[in-house]
Image (cartoon, helix red, strand yellow):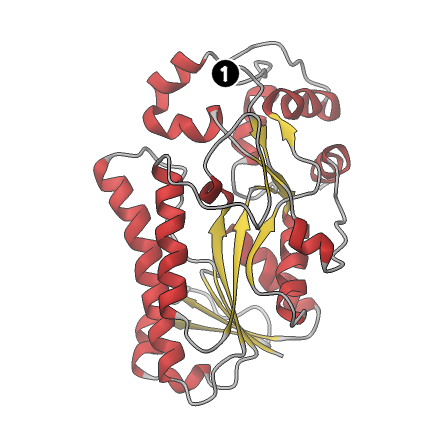
Amino acid sequence: MKYIICGGSGFIGRELTEYWLAAGHQILLAGRKLPNSKPAHPALSYTTWDDLATTPEIAENADALVNLAGASLSQRWSPSGKKAIMESRLETVSAAGKLIAALQHKPPVILQASAVAIYGTSFNDTFDEDSPARVMDFPSEVVKTWEAAADEAYQGVRLIKLRTGVVLGNEGGAFPKMKLPYSLGFGGRIGSGKQWLSWIHLEDIARLIDFCIRTLEITGPVNATAPNPVTNGQFGKMIGKVYHRPHWFPVPAVLLKAAIGELSEILLEGQRVLPAKAVNHGFTFTYPTLQPALEQLKSE
């Protein structure tokens, strides 16, 4: 198979690339610029958005396109930061859409990154793919706009919108920052600790992307979260248990808001999200519960 990954140099993209190369697939990674080093694998090649715009034929006959590109939400939400977050997503969707339109042999499926923020936040509700979008803060506004742009840009192909939760891995994402206070001996709940955290192990998200692409019946939104979400308090206690560190030092909401501003919403509010579509189509999680997931990360 030939797969195109946009944003392949990121946290999830690197894992997906390794997963597909190990399975014997051919990978074309698209980014803003070429890396300094040559491809480390004979089935791996690189291109840029500019090259794709001028010579789209290099993307002909791909079996799928995966678009993971977009600036991280984990930055201070200043006016310029918010603009960069929104524009980076819309620009890459637009560029990918133009590429698809220019191809004579389009990929039969596109998987577009999205996020569970589209459901809004709640301490009490449970969300699955049938739950409506609710714009109630900056993250939910970004994701709803992002998905609408994808619906407009990708015409005539099967579209999967992968709504990710907190992805747990050691080499990127939120987990190293979440674990750090425990490593320093100051771990504890954030705010009330009752806010939900819908998570997924990095290995499982790569497997889920592959599963969605290969399962022809899957289309539309797919929640990329483990089937057993936890509260912030439960998450912290499990880090303490697995890493043998104390869980005792709570971070008051007012202190967090003062430190990182509006970005604190991600940590102080959450949503309980279930992967109904993946489970109903037969996907099995390697790490359905938190403790084995953390134990695996500790063993790396």
Q: How many marks?
A: 1
Residue 103 horizontal/vertical position (percent): 40, 85
Say which quarter of the image contains residue 186.
top right
Identify the residue position indicated by label 1 in the image: 191
Q: In the orientation shown, which residue stands out farthest toward the left?
A: 79
Viewer-closest of 103 and 123: 123
Tell whether 139 sits left or right of 87. Answer: right
Q: Secondary structure at mark 1?
A: loop
Viewer-closest of 85 and 180: 85
Q: Residue at x 32, y 33 (%)?
A: 76
Tell whether 223 sits left or right of 258. Answer: right
Q: Quadrant of the N terminus?
A: bottom right
Up the image or down, 89 lies above or below 193; here it is below
Say which quarter of the image contains residue 17.
bottom right
Up the image or down, 7 lies above or below 246; here it is below
Would you call the spot at circle 1 few (<14 residues within 10 Å), some (14-19), or many (20 or more)? many
Tell whether 13 sits left or right of 21. Answer: left
Can residue 32 be seen here? The reply is no
Q: Quadrant of the C terminus?
A: top right
Q: Residue at x 36, y 67 (%)?
A: 152
Residue 191 horizontal/vertical position (percent): 50, 16
Q: Residue at x 59, y 27 (%)?
A: 179
Residue 115 horizontal/vertical position (percent): 49, 47
Say which quarter of the image contains residue 253.
top left
Residue 214 horizontal/vertical position (percent): 66, 71
- Residue type (three-letter) at the residue carrying disc 1: Gly
Q: In the orientation shown, which residue stands out farthest toward the bottom?
A: 104
Up the image or down, 209 lies above or below 276; here it is below
